[in-house]
Structures are given as C-alpha cells and as structure tokens.
Amino acid sequence: MEQMSAFRRPARALFVSIFVGLFAAYIFVSYSKPDMKIVLLLLLGFLTSFMANVFRMALIVVVAYYYGPGNACLETHEYAAS
C-alpha cells in the first residue's frame, strides 16, 4: 500500500475553523439579540465537536500503539477524520 503524506490532503482544521466562524457569525446575525438558549446550544456544539476530536485522537494513538505508526495509523487517521 502506498505511504500517505499529510500534505496530500487539504488542511481540515482550516476548513473546520472557517465553518465554525461562519456558523457563529450566522447565528449572531440571524438573531438580533441571541438569547441564552442559542448561546448555550452554540457552546454545546463547540464542546461536542471538541470532545469528538479528542476521542478521534485517542483512537489514533491506540491504533498507533498496537499496530505501529505505519499504514494502519495513517488509514485510521484518514477514516476517523471523514
């Protein structure tokens, strides 16, 4: 199997940051005065996405520990990121 390079894929963190920024801007523009419910849901969404990313990183570390940092780790990174 071909060795995958991190530079072959677009920067997913950049896309996520742009999406989060645009979504937050949409929320604050759509609601002239965001109430506490909207702010709490926005914060809950950020926290949930953060925890999902921590779980994804932990999964990659476990796979790298048991199978080595070779192709298994790279494939797990690719599948877990999509």
Image (spheres, rainbow, N blue to C red):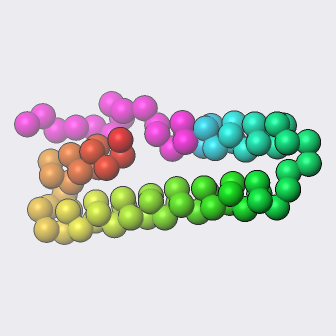
x and y percent of residue 72 in the render?
15, 52
Q: Residue at x 60, y 56 (%)?
A: 45
Residue found at the far left of this picture: 1
Q: Is residue 44 left or right of residue 33?
A: left
Q: Residue at x 19, y 68 (%)?
A: 65
Q: Residue at x 31, y 49 (%)?
A: 80
Which quadrant: the C terminus? Answer: top left
Q: Tell me, yes or no, whether the highlighted magenta stretch contains residue 10.
A: yes
Q: Nearer the viewer, residue 82 or 67?
A: 82
Which quadrant: the N terminus? Answer: top left
x and y percent of residue 44 in the render?
63, 61
Residue found at the far right of this picture: 33
Q: Nearer the viewer, residue 50 or 29?
A: 29
| Range of magenta residues | 1-16
Q: Residue at x 27, y 37 (%)?
A: 5
Task: Give the quarter of the image for residue 66.
Answer: bottom left
Q: Is residue 25 left or right of residue 49?
A: right
Q: Tell me, yes or no, whether the highlighted magenta stretch contains residue 27.
A: no
Q: Is residue 33 left or right of residue 49?
A: right
Look at the picture and state if 14 lies above or below 50.
above
